[in-house]
Image: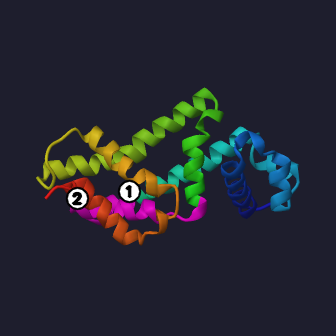
């Protein structure tokens, strides 16, 4: 058994959970799809909830890395946001499927796991955006505003595009448009 099998299981499970829903997919189905036994699945994951949590944690780690890389790549607030947005909108199909899982299947985790996941999302993903906005305010690059509200406004702009393949748009162009809308609005 290899790490590759673990990743293959997670990828297959994420795809099936998104397509059919968490409860509609069995561990047996996943095992058959990856050409492994159920015992092999349980070697890596104690149960289906542990598998779902592993998928969601892996996805969140990737998202955090994208955000941190965007923040570190530039000192200009607009360029930092652009790098972050391009990273999020440029996710591949498997990564987007895992994001959908985190959004729509989170309720299937136990209360403790759900709370821990939410705390990590807030502490590492959301805080990365807030930190860029606070630094932009401190440097005078963006006006002073409620950073929490601004963070959720940015994510709200991205939401319709983040779960699908940018809806047929060119990712760099769409990213520039969305960051421009966020920073400057639609007014003249």
Picture layout, residue 15 above or below residue 105: below
Can residue 164 be found in the magenta stretch?
no
Specify the principal SS of the magenta part.
Answer: helix
Give the quadrant of the C terminus.
bottom left
Give the quadrant of the N terminus.
bottom right
**Residue depth check, mark 1 versus mark 2: number of the one nearer the observer:** 2
Find the magenta span and give its range. Answer: 69-94
Estimate the x, y position of residue 88 in percent, counting from the top left. 44, 59
SS category of the residue bearing label 1:
helix
| Relative horizontal placement of residue 162, taking residue 72 as reference (left or right) | right
Picture layout, residue 170 above or below residue 77: below
Question: Callout 2 environment at 10 Å: few (<14), some (14 to 19), or many (20+)?
Answer: many
State the residue position of label 2.
77
| Relative horizontal placement of residue 59, taking residue 180 as reference (left or right) | right
SS category of the residue bearing label 2:
helix
Q: Is residue 23 visible?
A: yes
């Amino acid at each position: 058994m290899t790490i590759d099998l673990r990743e293959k299981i997670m990828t297959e499970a994420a795809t099936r959970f998104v397509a059919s829903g968490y409860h509609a997919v069995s561990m047996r189905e996943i095992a058959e799809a990856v050409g492994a036994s159920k015992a092999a699945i349980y070697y890596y994951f104690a149960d289906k909830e542990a598998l779902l949590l592993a998928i969601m944690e892996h996805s969140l780690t990737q998202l955090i890395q994208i955000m941190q890389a965007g923040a570190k790549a530039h000192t200009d607030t607009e360029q930092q946001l652009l790098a972050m947005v391009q990273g999020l909108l440029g996710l591949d199909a498997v990564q987007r499927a895992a994001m959908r899982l985190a959004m729509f299947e989170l309720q299937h985790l136990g209360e403790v796991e759900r709370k821990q996941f939410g705390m990590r999302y807030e502490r590492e993903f959301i805080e990365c955006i807030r930190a860029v906005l606070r630094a932009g305010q401190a440097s005078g690059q963006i006006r002073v505003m409620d950073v929490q509200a601004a963070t959720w406004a940015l994510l709200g702009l991205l939401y319709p595009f983040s779960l699908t393949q940018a809806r047929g748009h060119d990712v760099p162009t769409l990213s520039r448009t969305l960051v421009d809308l966020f920073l400057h609005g639609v007014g003249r």
